[in-house]
Amino acid sequence: MPKFDITRRLTAEALGTALLVATVVGSGIMAEALSKDVGLQLLGNTLPTGAILVVLITIFGPVSGAHFNPAVSLAMALKGDLSASEASRYIAAQILGGIAGTVIAHAMFGLPLFDFSMKVRTGSAQWFAEVVAAFGLVATILAGIRFNRPAVPWLVGLYITAAYWFTASTSFANPAVAIARSLTNTFSGIRPIDLPGFIAAELVGAVIALMAMGWLLRAVGSEQTK
């Protein structure tokens, strides 16, 4: 596989996160415009998000690893696949890209470029849901890389599609996306004041997944014997 320099990798992370957020926010705006049924609105938000993840991971995965998510970059840094310097730059690129994605979505629909969300998303149940969402996402990625790397785009897209519906929080599972979604007062928004709880829960879920899968995926033959 070809190696890409850090500038290209950071660009891929920023561009991929921007397109992901533009899809999440834009499809939410479109869903609200097309239907007053909240279930249909959520479905209209879910399917494009799962689909774009398959596309983005497929095209940007060979360049940067297609994290698009500080929780994933943290897990990869703790795993030793990224240096601390690389991880910090990945996270900065993801956050900036996510904010750009909200701006892009708003511009496409003729809305103010920045509009702080007023949608309440808080409480222990939703925080726990974000722990579960991030745990499942990172576990899916780690196991996919271990057993079937070419399937990772589909695995992640399908997992997020499912997690939109089985988690109480609709599975943000991504601090950069959460920050970007605080800047849209539309279907997919989250109040800025609710961000710390979501971000903390997402990072906790990612670290738990790294520890759990690090043990689970260690075959007997790979363990050192004394």
Image (cartoon, rainbow, N blue to C red):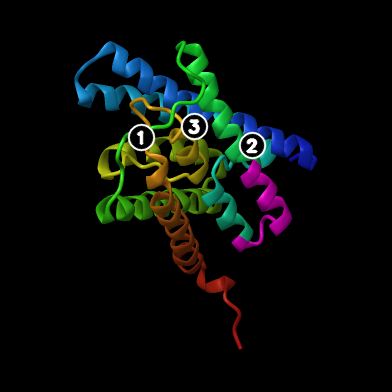
Q: Secondary structure at mark 3?
A: helix
Q: Amino acid at mark 2?
A: Glu
Q: Observer-nearest residue: 51 or 102?
A: 102
Q: Separation of disc 3 and disc 1 at Cα?
A: 10 Å
Q: Observer-nearest residue: 153 or 105?
A: 105
Q: Is residue 176 left or right of residue 190?
A: right
Main secondary-structure element of the magenta-colored stretch? helix
Residue at (30% x, 48% y) in the render: 122
Would you call the spot at circle 3 few (<14 residues within 10 Å), some (14-19), or many (20 or more)? many
Q: Separation of disc 3 and disc 2 at Cα?
A: 13 Å
User: How far across and down, in percent of the image, does residue 10 sit?
Assistant: 70, 38
Image quarter where the C terminus lies is bottom right
Q: Observer-nearest residue: 78 or 172?
A: 172
Mark 2 or 1: in front is 2
Name the mark on residue 53.
3
User: How far across and down, in percent of the image, does residue 38 sit?
Assistant: 21, 25
| Residue picked out by circle 1 | 161
| Residue picked out by circle 2 | 13
Q: Separation of disc 2 and disc 1 at Cα?
A: 21 Å
Q: Quadrant of residue 168?
A: top left
Residue at (58% x, 27% y) in the render: 100
Name the mark on residue 219.
none
User: How far across and down, in percent of the image, does residue 19 sit?
Assistant: 55, 26
Q: Secondary structure at mark 1?
A: helix
Mark 3 or 2: in front is 2
68 w.r.t. 54: above or below: below
Whichever of callouts 3 and 1 sits on the residue coming sooner in the sequence is 3
Residue at (49% x, 35% y) in the render: 180
Would you call the spot at circle 1 few (<14 residues within 10 Å), some (14-19), or many (20 or more)? many
